[in-house]
Amino acid sequence: MRIEVKGRNVTVDEELRARAERRFEKVERQVSTLARLELELYEERNPSIRDSQVAEGTLYLKGVTLRARDASEDLGRSINLVADELARQVKRHRDKRRGRRQAREAPPAAPAP
């Protein structure tokens, strides 16, 4: 899986990039190597918004795109929340695909006499 970390009004240093890659290892094990993740980090400029550090993740898989957005007071926490949300979405997507495949492979039920 390729991970692109972008910053909007935020500088993305190596520490932040490494933290993001470490947090998305769980998702990386569940998806194909062709998957692509775009992680966009930015700060809300409105002073009345308490959770101003925002992380948005877009995961491009074969045939489906999964998105997550979370905000908190700390950018690292926002990355963790997005990683957890995308992991849940990937698991749900895999379970759905597995269920459809098993339903297709199951022999049709014989009608009751």
Image (cartoon, rainbow, N blue to C red):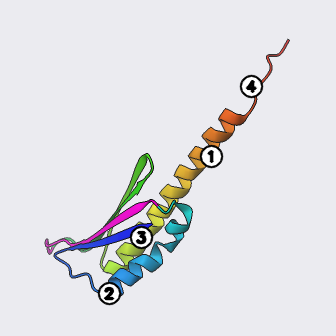
Give, as a three-letter code, the residue at label 2: Glu
Quadrant that contains the C terminus: top right
Task: Please state which of the two labelled residues, at mark 2 or mark 3, is closer to the viewer.
Answer: 2
Give the labeled residue for mark 1: 98
Across and down, in percent, residue 31 comes to 52, 60
Residue at 66%, 33% in the rendered image:
104
Tell me the distance, in whole angstroms, between the alpha carbons under discs 4 and 1.
18 Å
Give, as a three-letter code, the residue at label 3: Leu
Q: Which mark is residue 108?
A: 4
45 relative to 29 in the view: left or right: left
| Of pointers 4 and 2, the one earlier in the residue sequence | 2
Across and down, in percent, residue 67 comes to 37, 56
Figure check: 109 above or below 95: above
Give, as a three-letter code, the residue at label 4: Pro
Task: Please state which of the two labelled residues, at mark 3 or mark 4, is closer to the viewer.
Answer: 4
Q: Is mark 1 on a helix, strand or loop?
A: helix
The magenta-colored residue range is 34-47
Give the labeled residue for mark 3: 81
Disc 4 packing (10 Å; few <14; some 14–19; many ≥20): few
Disc 2 packing (10 Å; few <14; some 14–19; many ≥20): few
Task: Please state which of the two labelled residues, at mark 3 or mark 1, is closer to the viewer.
Answer: 1
Give the labeled residue for mark 2: 14
| Of pointers 3 and 4, the one earlier in the residue sequence | 3
- Work out which residue is located at the far front of the displayed protein and give it: 34
Residue at 33%, 83% in the rendered image:
16
Figure check: 15 above or below 90: below
Tell me the distance, in whole angstroms, between the alpha carbons under discs 2 and 3.
20 Å
Q: What element carries label 2?
A: helix
Q: Please report contact status of discs 2 and 3: CB closer than 8 Å, yes or no.
A: no
| Of pointers 2 and 3, the one earlier in the residue sequence | 2
Disc 3 packing (10 Å; few <14; some 14–19; many ≥20): many
Residue at 39%, 77% in the rendered image:
20
